[in-house]
């Protein structure tokens, strides 16, 4: 049965997410049919603030249940990478004098998922003991980082533990077009087939 997330109250979403993520089936990566343990948590972009609050509460509640969450915000990580490479100030200065397209191209190069972003995520995975990875900040890094590129490049790096990506938009499956991540509910061109909609997962 298809669940309409837009009709689910936040408290119900919280309860569903907590029940699924704290369950042994989820933590042990059971029932995935050899797919990578990637889960999309879609939500309406206009409810981002509520969703951030829900995410914080979820981390606290899971922590109380003995489940360790590693949180990585893609926007914060991007700034961290730019600062580590000593180009943060330079990019801020350039922002005023170059076009949006030039800035996008520049950021796409220095934050390329394959060569920069995913290795930075891999380093954090190695340093931390955790049970589940939460990825957020997807909307803030658009358009220079696309979520399907991150997921494609993470497949070999983050397959040991479940990953939940909080996604401001829809994740739809159809027989005609396959699966697509629809950022902000408008952009339908990000094909990604290998993740599960967490609201359609059973505990």
Image (cartoon, rainbow, N blue to C red):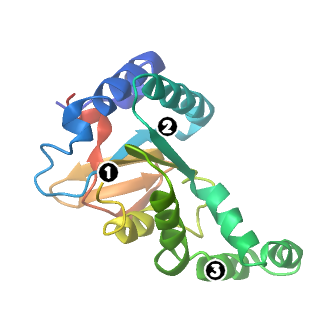
Seen in the picture, residue 65 relative to 105 is either above or below; the reply is: above
Estimate how packed mark 1 is, as few (under 14), some (14 to 19) or many (20 or more) residues with alpha carbons within 10 Å. Answer: some
Labels 3 & 1 near each other (Cβ < 8 A): no
Residue 30 is left or right of residue 43, and the answer is left
Instruction: Name the mark nearer the viewer: 3 or 1.
Output: 1
Seen in the picture, residue 129 relative to 20 is either above or below; the reply is: below
Rendered-image quadrant of the C terminus: top left
From mark 3 to mark 2, how far is it between C-alphas?
30 Å
Residue 131 is left or right of residue 23, and the answer is right
Residue 22 percent coordinates (x, y): 32, 29
Where is residue 49, by image quadrant? top right
Q: Residue at x 38, y 63 (%)?
A: 151
Q: Secondary structure at mark 2?
A: loop
Where is residue 5, by image quadrant? top left
Q: Mark 3 or mark 2: name the one nearer the start of the chain.
A: 2
Residue 193 percent coordinates (x, y): 25, 60
Which residue, given by chain and number where applicable, does mark 3 sit on? 110
Q: Secondary structure at mark 3?
A: helix
Residue 172 is left or right of residue 189, and the answer is left
Rendered-image quadrant of the N terminus: top left
Which residue, given by chain and number where applicable, does mark 1 sit on? 161
Estimate how packed mark 2 is, as few (under 14), some (14 to 19) or many (20 or more) residues with alpha carbons within 10 Å. Answer: some
Instruction: Name the mark nearer the viewer: 1 or 2.
Output: 1
Q: Residue at x 64, y 65 (%)?
A: 78
Seen in the picture, residue 121 relative to 169 is either above or below; the reply is: below
Instruction: Name the mark nearer the viewer: 3 or 2.
Output: 3
From mark 3 to mark 1, how far is it between C-alphas?
27 Å
From mark 1 to mark 2, how far is it between C-alphas?
26 Å
Which residue, given by chain and number where applicable, does mark 2 sit on? 44
Q: Nearer the viewer, residue 105 or 4?
A: 105
């Amino acid at each position: 049965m298809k669940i309409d997330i837009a009709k689910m109250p936040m408290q119900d979403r919280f309860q569903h997410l907590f029940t699924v993520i704290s369950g042994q089936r989820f933590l042990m990566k059971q029932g995935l049919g050899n797919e990578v343990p990637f889960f999309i948590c879609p939500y309406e972009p206009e409810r981002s603030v509520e969703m951030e609050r829900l995410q914080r509460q979820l981390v606290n509640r899971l922590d109380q249940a003995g489940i360790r969450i590693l949180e990585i915000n893609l926007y914060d990580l991007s700034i961290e990478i730019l600062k580590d490479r000593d180009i943060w100030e330079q990019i801020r200065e350039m922002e005023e004098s170059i076009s949006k397209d030039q800035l996008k191209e520049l950021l796409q190069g220095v934050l390329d998922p394959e060569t920069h972003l995913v290795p930075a995520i891999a380093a954090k995975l190695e340093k931390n003991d955790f049970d589940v990875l939460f990825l957020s900040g997807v909307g803030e890094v658009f358009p220079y980082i696309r979520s399907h590129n991150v997921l494609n490049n993470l497949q070999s790096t983050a397959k040991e533990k479940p990953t939940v990506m909080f996604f401001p938009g829809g994740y739809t499956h159809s027989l005609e077009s396959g699966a697509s991540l629809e950022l902000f509910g408008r952009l339908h061109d990000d094909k990604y087939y290998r993740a599960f909609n967490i609201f359609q997962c059973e505990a």
